[in-house]
Amino acid sequence: MENGNLSYTHKNYLIETIDRLAMHKMNVLHLHLVDDQGWRMEIKKYPKLTEVGAFRVDQENIIWSARLPVSSLDKGTYGGYLTQEDLKELVKYAQLKNVEIIPEIEMPAHVSSAIASYPELSCFEDPIGVPSGSVWPITDIYCAGKESTFEFLENVLDEVIDVFPSRYIHIGGDEATKINWEKCPNCQKRMRTENLKNPHELQSYFVKRIEKYINSKGKKLVGWDEILEGGLAPDATVMSWRGVKGGIEAAKQGHDVVMTPNTHCYFDHHQGHQNEEPLAIGGYTPISKVYEFDPIIDSMTVAETKHILGGQANLWAEYIPNNSQSEYMIYPRLAAMAEVLWSPKELRDWNDFSSRITTMFERYKELDINYAKSIYLVNPTTEVDLDKKEVYLSLINEFSNSDIRYVLGNQNINENAIKYTKPLGFKETTIVKASLFKNNKPIGKIFLDTIKFHNAVACKVNYISPYDDNYKGAEALGLVNLIRGTKNHHDGQWQAWLKKDMEVIIDLENEKTIKEVTMGSIENQGRNIYFPNTIEVYASTDGVNYTKIAKTEHFFAINPISELKDFKMSFEKTTARFLKISATNIKTTPKGTDAWLFVDEILVN
Ligand code: ACM
Ligand code: ZN
């Protein structure tokens, strides 16, 4: 969503998106119209759903999951919604293009926006604000005990059904944390009178009741795979997102299924090496992985496969600040999805597809679509032989038999670059540039890395403050192994401290003359990972008496990106055998949660 007249910019973008879906032979547009952070469809009977529920406090400068809690007294200014007129226009336009729009009206969770508008929809009716960012776990959900909840939902669905002629209505159903249901007298009463053994069965009751209503209007219900829990509604179609197991189970039970496993179909994930891509929610789903998607599972019987209606790609917008970024995440992965869904398995061929995708790029360019060129990225993997103190760099790319060429040092990449054939070995600090080549010309983004050597490689590190068990990095030599961490903080190179400072002593094995210490760190405020406040370096020749030789400070600031940083501390030439390095954790985030401090390498020169 962008600021300004959202209804206008968003509607136009949706119109363009419908054109592009049609161009890719995709024939359904699933519109997720309700979530915690915004209610996006005008409902005439309940005007506050959009007056209140469509707007949140503007914290767009802060990473989604680092945004601060809000109260019901805070006024939302960032947001927008589509009127019923807008939506009818979209439906009509989509019909011309043979695209069916299926609306999703979430329940019983992902509805903080509705509860902020009408607190009486929740179990305890406490006023809340529309959250500006992530909500986890989701406990503010509709009360399943009160009749008024169902009355509200039926009235909302009446208007939704009036606007959308689709065969299906999607009712969400995902990610409801039901702790309020276990405490609420109304929900408890409902469980007793309906003979429901647990909250899952209460959600099943909820969905079955809504299904009955939707069926009475001549429509079919679809829901996320959580609707299997506690028992499926009799005619429900299941959208399998937590992998394919929900879809397999639903098909076994004789229900229709749409496959959209988060392993292959989530277009909010990164599509290239994380260091080279805009901030995303996480995950790694390059186009070649999308091309491996198959909505039919080998173990299914023929009868079960008949229940697989197809597949779907999902673009969740938490990390999508504007339409241009939305395009970047959708294209060209949508082309892979379309080909997979329309081609029999035996005709799918990644090599062939990847050679044809560049033709699609020409079309995208012509249409002014901000498509991702991540398929051209050169991706590095680094290995190290610590005995020989040698680093090996491998360069690969999604195209098979790709022509990757590289240069070392300060040269520029041109047709004279060296063809890459096997991992490159390095024994000293070296700049590496590489690129994919086509017709003897570099294409795509130039890969640039500096392999940095230093005096502490493979030296013994004594941890005065041990790293967290969840982020052990490469353990004993992790901070001195020459392999740098990436923006993927789960890459196995990072050591981390939760709410604790880092303090280590490096034994350089014999006295060395040094003049610089550098500590590598990452900040991703959305993951509660913050740069340190202060880093100090102490030197010693005997391991007993230490002298402070360097200090650097970093002042906390809101950081809207994920960032790697080398904190470099230079000082007068010093002779040292032991170095004590301490880095202070900010300990508590502005949101009040525990803060992480991440370190990948300490370089001594
Ligand atoms: C989902 O991604 N929560 C359906
Ligand atoms: Zn309740």
Image (cartoon, rainbow, N blue to C red):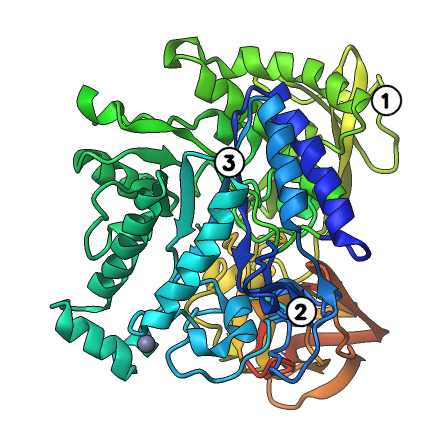
Q: Residue farthest to the left?
A: 195
Residue 602: mark: none
Q: Residue farthest to the bottom?
A: 545
Q: Which residue is drawn at 63% across and 69% down?
A: 132
Q: Which numbered disc, 3 or 1, marks the residue that appears first in the sequence? A: 3
- Percent position of residue 181, x then y: 30, 75
Q: Which numbered disc, 1 or 2, marks the residue that appears first in the sequence? A: 2
- Mark 3 or mark 1, whichever is nearer to me: 3
14, 63: nearer the viewer: 14
Question: Could you say whether the residue bearing mark 3 is in a helix, strand or loop?
Answer: loop
Q: Mark 1 points at which residue?
A: 414
Q: Gap in Å between the C-alphas at discs 1 and 2?
A: 50 Å
* Three-letter code, disc 2: Arg
Mark 3 Cα-neighbour bin, 10 Å: few <14, some 14–19, many ≥20: many
**Left or right: 44 with respect to 57?**
left
Q: Which residue is drawn at 88% across and 32% down?
A: 411
Residue 56: mark: 2
Q: Gap in Å between the C-alphas at discs 2 and 3?
A: 27 Å
Q: Name the residue under label 3.
A: 313
For ligand 1, tell me if the residue under mark 2 lies within 8 Å.
no
Mark 2 Cα-neighbour bin, 10 Å: few <14, some 14–19, many ≥20: many
**Left or right: 350 with respect to 274?**
left
Question: Could you say whether the residue bearing mark 2 is in a helix, strand or loop?
Answer: strand
Work out which quarter of the rendered image holds the C terminus and state it.
bottom right
Q: Is residue 437 above or below residue 586?
A: above
Mark 1 Cα-neighbour bin, 10 Å: few <14, some 14–19, many ≥20: some
* Three-letter code, disc 1: Asn
